[in-house]
Image: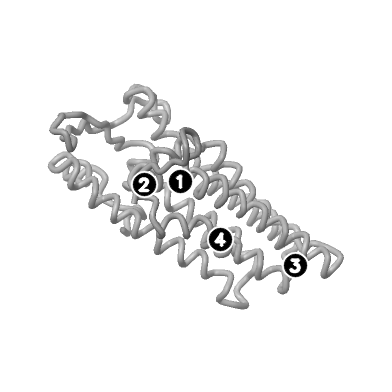
Amino acid sequence: MELYPRIGKHFDIKVFTNCRFGMMSWAVLAVTYCIKQYEMNGRVADSMLVNTALMLIYITKFFWWESGYWCTMDIAHDRAGFYICWGCLVWVPSTYTSPGMYLVNHPVNLGPQLAISILLAGILCIYINYDCDRQRQEFRRTNGKASVWGKAPSKIVASYQTTKGETKTSLLLTSGWWGFSRHFHYVPEILAAFFWTVPALFNHFMPYFYVIHLTILLLDRAKRDDDRCSTKYGKYWKMYCNRVPYRVVPGIY
């Protein structure tokens, strides 16, 4: 399994599977479920509108922030084997859109007040998820000199050795969103998924399969990332964990 497989000079296979196909087909399927509900019922329920709007806002956020995605585990560390390629080509489009697929045959009328409340809560979670990634990306881009919430950032300068025996340094951010937990950005991501699922209300388990799957996926990813960083940074990672003791959920885990 290659880390950055290419066909020719410019066709990056992971960028195609993860971004071009996986994320774009997610958006296309979300819209088709709206169209199908309109064909069947002559109208689109407010629950479907909230579900689709939040997913499209999230996907738009993803492509707006796409350059930051190159530094995530998916691109930087996970090799392009069956797990990631099949997952992005098949699992993402079919499973991540499943709440909308459920709503096609089970429309729910939320009413304006509840629909707007869910929509705003979902948008807030998507924004926090984006701002977490933006904050760390800006911190790295400026070599730790960017202000975090109007203050100088708190950080740990960690040294490590490459496979070639070279000594290099990384900056570990310990303030802002990243002072709450080591993977705090997963919290608003899970909550955003919950808010574009909850328009289906609680009449069936099926719409919530995606949220449960995403929670397990991200908790596992957080552990894998912690294990990798512990091996990479050694004593500096212990210092980081002492300063930011929670892995994902502040005060709990």
Image coords of residue 253 (percent x, y): 31, 58
Q: Nearer the viewer, mark 2 or mark 3?
A: 2
Instruction: Check disc 4: other Cα within 10 Å, few if <14, some if 14-19, many if 20+.
Output: many
Kindly report the distance in space between the C-alpha atoms of the residues bearing marks 2 and 3.
39 Å
Question: On screen, 31 above or below 15?
Answer: below
Q: Earlier in the sequence, mark 3 or mark 1?
A: 1
Q: Where is residue 179 drawn, in percent x and y?
A: 33, 41
Residue 130: image tag: none
Q: Residue at the right extreme?
A: 42
Distance from Cα at disc 1 to Cα at disc 4: 19 Å
Displayed quadrant of residue 75: top left
**Dot 4 amino acid type:** Tyr
Neighbor class of circle 1 (other Cα within 10 Å; few <14, some 14-19, many 20+) is many
Q: Quadrant of residue 113?
A: bottom right
223 horizontally vs 29: left or right: left
Q: Secondary structure at mark 3?
A: loop
Residue 109, disc: 3
Q: What's under tag 3, amino acid-wise?
A: Asn
Residue holding disc 1: 14
Q: Which residue is under mark 2? A: 73
> Are the residues tagged 4 and 2 within 8 Å (C-beta)?
no
* Amino acid at the residue labelled 2: Met
User: For this rendering, which residue is in front, 80 or 192?
Assistant: 80
Residue at 15 percent across and 29 percent down: it is 167
Where residue 124 appears, as percent x and y from the top left, is 56, 46
